[in-house]
Image (cartoon, rainbow, N blue to C red):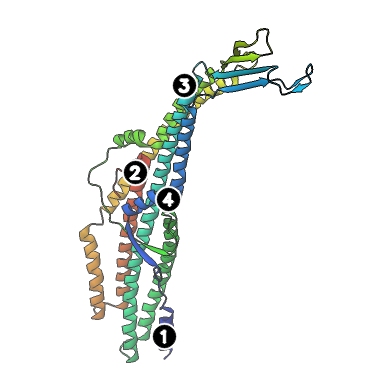
Amino acid sequence: MRYQKMIMCLLVVGKINFGVANAQDTLKLNYKQAEAILLKENITLMSAHYDVEIAQAQAMQAKAWNNLYLNWNQDLYSVERNEYFNQNNQRLVQVDYNFSIAGKYTNTVRLAKVNTELNELMLQDVVRSLIFELGQTFNSLNALQKKQVVYQEVLTKYRNMIAAGQKQLEVGAIAGNEVVRLRSEQIALETVALDNTNQIIDVMSELRKLLAMKPGTYLQTENEIVVKETPLVLTDLYAMGADFRPDYKLADKQITYSEINLKLQKSIAFPDVTVGYQPHDKGSNYVRPYTGLVVEFELPTFNRNKGNIKAASSGIRQAELEKKMKGNELDNEINSAYIQWLNTQVCLANYTDAFMKSVEELNYNANLNYNKKNISLLAFIDLQRIYLENKLQFIELSSLYQQSGIRLNFTVGKEVVNQ
């Protein structure tokens, strides 16, 4: 009787539902579909596009020529005639234009163009980083959801066996401690499954934020492991990184920007020339009306822009060092990602189709043998643990392989491992 009360209590506790998709719309999507949504809907990415548009607008503005200046001068008050605003006494019209010399206009336009290219590369790097984050998040969620399926499979098996054991216990066919032992395994597994469910909730929230989705959608990921057959050559990956990594190309382009900026600062040392034309001047010159030419320019006596020229020169050397540092960083990141990808590929090769089939058969036979009383309860529980451990390890290793491939793609700047 004591065992029966204990079993009933445990069965009530066992009604916890680990599903997280209840009362939610379910959206099934694979990685490529998620990537397409990211590129279209991600708010960070959309915001980064405006940086490019701003740089393009600034480049357009840099191409604009200076405006003409119109000067109008007239008599305000004549003491002799005691008159106000009489332009017949004196008036002057002058048109001025400021000419930039020594290549200031050309270098400003070139600098604005390179700045646009820098912003385009920064946008590419934002895309690269977001795709990396998406891949990590998507595959983490996929692994957690696959684990949850395994947990539910084993939990369902325990629940069915406990229900059958309860009926046998009522007629005295089995001892109560067997049902308690099964229920103990179920509770332990439910605790692990609950933690996995909470992780699914957290990771799915991160994925929805990346895809700009509201919390009412349950994302069911679909992703198959594709092991790359063609070997990758490390030296080729180094070359690809230099060609495709936007952050490395950004460091290289920064040198060009600094070189043009030095030319611009040197040209700024030469003063602009303002040329003015006076088509009409009445009353303020010895010849009436008077037509004249005005030439104005700054005398570079105190300010020759030396400080900015020196800063621009130092900027070139700094950009060259940063490119060198970025190149070393690139090679080391690719090397590390490549080795990790190879290692996980080797380990994943141990989980052959034949091996996973034997694990499934072991689990199936364990059920049959326990029902036929060919094996003890402890032997059955041990076989369930072996089955659960192998299935979870395979899922975990598959996820690690996917994650290492995502990281390798990120470090190279190009998809060399399919996702």
Whether residue 209 is visible: yes
Residue 201 lies in what quarter of the image?
Answer: bottom left
Circle 1 crowding by C-alpha within 10 Å: few under 14, some 14–19, many from 20:
few
CA separation, marks 3 and 4? 37 Å
Where is residue 213? Give x, y as percent: 42, 58
Q: Which residue is mark 4?
A: 42
Nearest to N terminus: mark 3 or mark 4:
4
Distance from disc 4 to disc 1, alpha carbons, whole Å, reads: 50 Å
Quadrant of the drawing holding the N terminus: bottom left
- Give how far apart the Cα atoms at labels 1 and 2 are: 54 Å
The image position of residue 76, as x and y in percent, is: 73, 22
**SS at circle 2:** helix
Which corner quadrant of the image does residue 252 belong to?
Answer: top left
Residue type of the residue flagged with mark 4: Asn
Residue 155's place in the image compared with 57, above or below, is below
Q: What residue do we see at 38% from left, 59% from top? A: 141
- Mark 1 or mark 2: whose residue is earlier in sequence: 1
- Residue 305 seen in this snapshot: no
Q: Which mark is residue 106?
A: 3
Please give the residue where the numbered disc 1 appears in the rendered image: 8
Nearest to the eye among marks 1 and 2: give it.
Answer: 2
Q: Is residue 291 left or right of residue 104?
A: right
Name the amino acid type tagged 2: Asn
